[in-house]
Structures are given as C-alpha cells and as structure tokens.
Amino acid sequence: MRKKIMPCLIIIVLISAIIGCRPQQQAAKSNEQDLLHIQSTKQQASKKVIFLLVDALMAQAIDQGIRRQELPTFQYLIQHGQYYKDMVSSFPTMSVTIDSSLLTGSYPNEHRVPGLTWYSTEAKKVINYGTGPMEIFKHGIESVMLDGLIHLNATHLNPQLPTIYEDLARHGLKSASINGLIYRGRTPHTLTIPSWVQGLTSIPNEIKVHGPDFMALGALSNPLQGKTSLPKSVFSKMGVNSAYSIETLNYLIQANTLPDFSLVYLPDIDQQLHRKGPANMKDVKGIRDVDQQIHTMLQAFGSPEKALSEAVIIIAGDSGMTQILPSNENPVIDLPALLQNDHVLRPGKAVSADTEIVLAVNETMAYVYNIGQRQSLRGLATKLSLDPRMDYMAWKEDGWIYVKQGNSDRELRYKVKGDYSDPYQQKWSVEGDIGVLDLQVDHANHTLHYGQYPDALQRLQGALHSHPGEFIVVGAKPGYELVDRSSPTHKGGGGHGSLRNEESLVPLILCGTDQKPKHLRIIDLKPFILQLLIKNEGE
C-alpha cells in the first residue's frame, strides 16, 4: 500500500552493507522476558483476538483472487465470517497516521500524528519518519531514526491518549505487537540497533522503549532469539516482512503462549503495488503469499475450525491505492515549481527568517505551511488551485474549515456542531457548494451523506487540527501525485495519501464472532476489540 518507516531504513542499512560496514551481530535477549509474562493473569472468559493488518490489502484484489481460485484461505474465512469492502481508513492515508488511529480509536486531531512527514512548529523542523531514501539522507539518517524509533511512540503520539495495549493492561489483559510501527504500551523493552547502523549515527546500540507484553520488531526486537529461526537478515528487510510476522505468531500459537490480543503486521504487498499499481493487481504475487501465510496460521491451531473456535480473527487493509499515470502523461505535481515566487524550504535545510513556505508531502496529499505569513491561506490555496491536476485545498479560518476545488471557483465551508447529521451521528454546519466534497444533503431530514470522499468532514477536520501551525491541506486528483524536490515518485505505479474512496476504503474480514464494529471505520475497531475482550468482566 504505502512506504513504511522500516523499509526506508532498510534501504539505508543495505547501502551501509554494500559500502563495507560490519555485519550485524545478534544481540542476546537476556533482558527480554516476553514469553514469561504474556499469559493472561485473569480468568480467560473470551476468545483470543488476532488482528492481521495487511498493508495495501484491497477488496478488489481479494475478489479477483477468489474468482481466479487463487485464494482458498480468504475464500474459507469469508464463507465462515463477515466480509466488508468499505471500511474507512484514517487521513492522510499514510502508515503512521493510520496505525495511530487504529490503536487509539481516534483521528489525528486527538492522537497528534499528522502524517508520514509534517512540520513541527515547536522543533522548527520537518519531521520525516521515512518517506524515501533521498529525503532520509537530506533530513539526516540519525534524525529520521530518532523520530521513527523513539519520538514517534514516546512523544509525538499523544501521551494522554491511551493505546489499546495500555487499555488492555489496565484491565489485566495481555497483548502482543509483531512488526507494528505504533507499539506504545506499559511494558519496558529494548531495541537493539545493529552495529553497522551505529556506524552511520551516534545512536546507542540499545534504546529503551515501552510496548505491549510481547513485542517483536524485526531484528531490532526479537523475543524469540535462540528459540526459533526467523527471516531477519539484511536481505529480508531485517525481519520487517510478512514471513517473520506469521512465523512469530505461529510460534506463540503452537507454544500455547498466545496473549489475549495480538496485532500482526504483514507489509509485503505494499511495495509491489507501489511498483505495479492497482491496475495490474493480478500480477501482484503478495496477495497469494498472504493467503498461504494465513493458512499456516490456521493450521498452527490444528485446523481452521479449531482456530475459529478459539480465536476471533480480524483481517484488514490499512489504505487503498490509486493508479498513478505513466511518465508521458505528466503525473507529478511539482509543488516548489507551483510556488516558485515563494521561498520554499529545501529538504534538510533549517528554517530561517527568509523561509516563507514549508512542504510536507505525503504522496497524493501534502501539508503546505505558510511560515512567513506574507500571504493569506486563501491566497496560497488559490495559487495552488490553478494547476488542473489539483483536487482540493482545505484550510481553517475564523472557526470554519474552507475547502476549495482545484482549477475552479467552487468552494464550501463547514464547522462542527450544526444541524446536519452524517451517517456517523456527527453534527455539522455546511454552507456553499456541497459538490466540492461530493456531499449529498437531505434538507428535509437534516442529514448528509458522503460520496467520493468518505467521512470527509471529520477526516479533514482531524488533519487540520492535528498539530499547531498555519497550513493548508492539498490533495491531487486521481492519477497524479505531489512532490517536493527529493520526494519519491511512482509513475505508472500506485500512490496514496489522499481523501478519495480509492485510497480510503479498505476490506475488513471478521471470523469467530457474530459481532461487528458500531461503524465501518478504522477508528471504530479499537472499541470493538475492547468490547470483545472485556465484555465478560462486568464493566
């Protein structure tokens, strides 16, 4: 589906390996006792819950694979469970924001992780968790690693907002994160940094963090070291791969040490889809590999039937993907070129008194920061809207959110607590051209419904209130992507980040339960999972 922090760091590690740094030394896990304390201390009255978060999993890939008789495990689970094709992801549809929304049950206005890259007014620098190798080098390998491995979970993710791991611990329930990027919990862990990575930075060889009871993060945190062999070499992305994730989960199942809740991240489809794009989904081998990996998980219980009798199994995608046009159709929107009369900060450079604009590009979505404030946000939005490939520009002004359609004068504004109720029981005041966000409004019943931009009002509200600063949110039309001077591009491949259905709607499969979330949104999964696990505690 999308670029993730760890794969980008792996690129750096691969480069360091090629230029002759020392091979990684396997650190002993003498200070990790995960397997000793993941058994629930409470009387287990509910099934275990296993959540498989499959990066870039799309409903059309599942449907196409079943029609081609290539996905027998998906077909079995769908026949014995519930299958939804339209769960709404977070916004922007980028890794860390989605994972933060999943684990906190909130949009970024509450969890405070705005995107894979964003600008911090407090630190006066662009935060980049790993958008691409060139940007990693320009922002600094050490800065990116510190933000991604330490600050993201420790301080950027709202410390006052509990994750599902913290909530489960409060109820005496045990949890596991296997290759999850957002992992904050109550149990101390140690990330071990390979010596060859240390050669590039001054980062210590051990980093103390807090996570769930069991925490596996590739070669950086391997609680099964010495117990089973896992694919975690530099050539298998240092363990941040789907085989590592499933083999770790299977070990816990077969050893009868499965905690109450396990989140298992399967990342492999993402990069394939970025290269080929969703239009060539039949050529993506990853979905067939996931089917086989899930099959091995079911067999680890003894049989699929036994698995569904002992566990609730949840399988979900995190975001969709849009097909990016080929190079000859001019798919790349060069934001610095559109803002050539403004002093736009170059990636990796420090903000100065001359800086007017800072960009934080998240593929098909971007934050554009009006640092110099020498023009209004409306003026900045109008300037960007002149490019016919721009989809929308949104900003805050006088308590309202304004949304301007690209390459037109059409505009709407809205704010919370109005007379119109949406399908999620959220109240809004909406004025202007509702077609800008493809809204359908029933004036007689005071209701509104979403079209091409699911839960658009709340998701835009979440992004625009996710962090301090004066900025606009911009999105590219389908087929196009936004870039800064060193952003990765996906011409002829796939991209995401923006607000439309193609990038926002993901599949959800529920097995082993007849219950379902209150709403089909990724932020509604946390309360659903907590309900499954604590419903018999009398609370």
Image: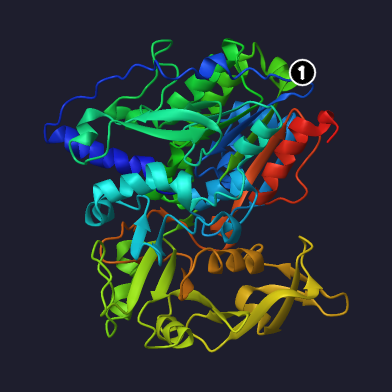
Residue 518 drawn at (x, y percent): 78, 48
Identify the element where label 1 is drawn: loop
* Image quarter of residue 376: bottom left
Figure quadrant of residue 438: bottom right
Q: Please identify the residue farthest to the left as the structure is shown.
A: 20
Q: Which residue is mark 1?
A: 43
Quadrant position of the C terminus in the picture: top right
Relative height, residue 37 to residue 521 (above, below): above
For the point 77% across and 18% down, the residue is: 43
Q: For residue 84, say whether it is visible.
A: no
Name the outermost residue toward the right. 444
In the depicted structure, whether residue 525 falls above or below residue 46: below
Q: Position of residue 365 (x, y in %)?
A: 45, 65
Relative to 174, residue 438 above or below: below
**Mark 1 belongs to which amino acid?**
Gln
Along the horizontal axis of the image, is 433 left or right of 331?
Answer: right
**Which residue appears at 61% of the width and 68% of the height?**
461
Q: Please give the name of the residue rendered at 15% of the width and 34% of the height, measured from the top-left corner.
A: 18
Which is nearer the eye, 195 or 218? 195
- The foreground one among 407 and 459 is 459
